[in-house]
Amino acid sequence: MEKFKRTIKFLLAANKGVDIVTYKWVKDSLKSGSLKNPDPYIFADKDGETKHKFKLATTLQKAKKKKAGILSGYKVFVPINIKPSLDELKMLIEACDGQYLKTKPLRFSEDTLVVLNEDDQKNAESVKKFGFTPYTTELIFSGILH
């Protein structure tokens, strides 16, 4: 049985409303010689969905209907030491219609988010001095799924 993992590729697909199907869809499509309708093969993992409090089918339906990503209108700063990697987070931010900031903001702005590792106290204290609330990557990950 397949288990849910919040990988960057999974989140990118969910964000865009791309059908996420089981391996059985691949096997059945190959066997029939044509692409099968993905609807009966949409991936589901009740334990994973319960743990992260979402339903994948609902997430995909919402994503297909939305006109803009969850970060539309926001600038997002993430430091070089962010986990997962900076390149992956940058890709996710841009896929969610956010603008990636290369440098730490030095002036508060309501349209700017600062995303840090949970244990990054040094950067957290620094951005708090400018009036920012530091967030973790969970803000983006959960935002996509809900």
Image (spheres, rainbow, N blue to C red):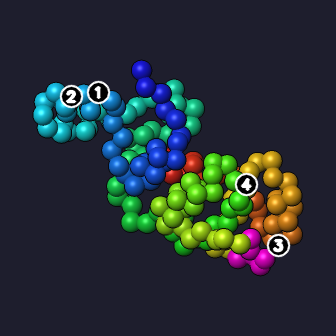
The residue that label 2 is drawn on is 28
Which residue is drawn at the image coordinates 85% and 65% (left, top)? Answer: 126
Between 116 and 84, the one nearer to me in the picture: 84
Q: Majority secondary structure of the magenta segment?
A: loop
Which picture quadrant has residue 111?
bottom right
- Badge count: 4
CA gap, disc 4 and disc 1 = 38 Å
Taking the magenta stretch, the answer to whether it contains residue 42 is: no
Q: Residues within 10 Å of mark 1 (few under 14, many from 20)?
A: few
51 on left or right of 128? left
Which residue is drawn at the image coordinates 81% and 70% (left, top)? Answer: 131
Name the front one of labels 2 and 3. Answer: 2
21 on left or right of 54? left
Magenta stretch, residue numbers: 104-109
Name the front one of labels 3 and 1. Answer: 1
Q: Secondary structure at mark 3?
A: loop
Q: Which sits earlier in the primary sequence, circle 3 or circle 4? A: 4
CA gap, disc 2 and disc 4 = 42 Å
**CB under 8 Å between callouts 2 and 4?**
no
Which residue is outermost to the bottom?
107
The residue that label 3 is drawn on is 130
The residue that label 1 is drawn on is 24
Q: Which sits earlier in the primary sequence, circle 4 or circle 1? A: 1
- Under mark 1, the amino acid is Lys
Between 45 and 91, the one nearer to me in the picture: 91
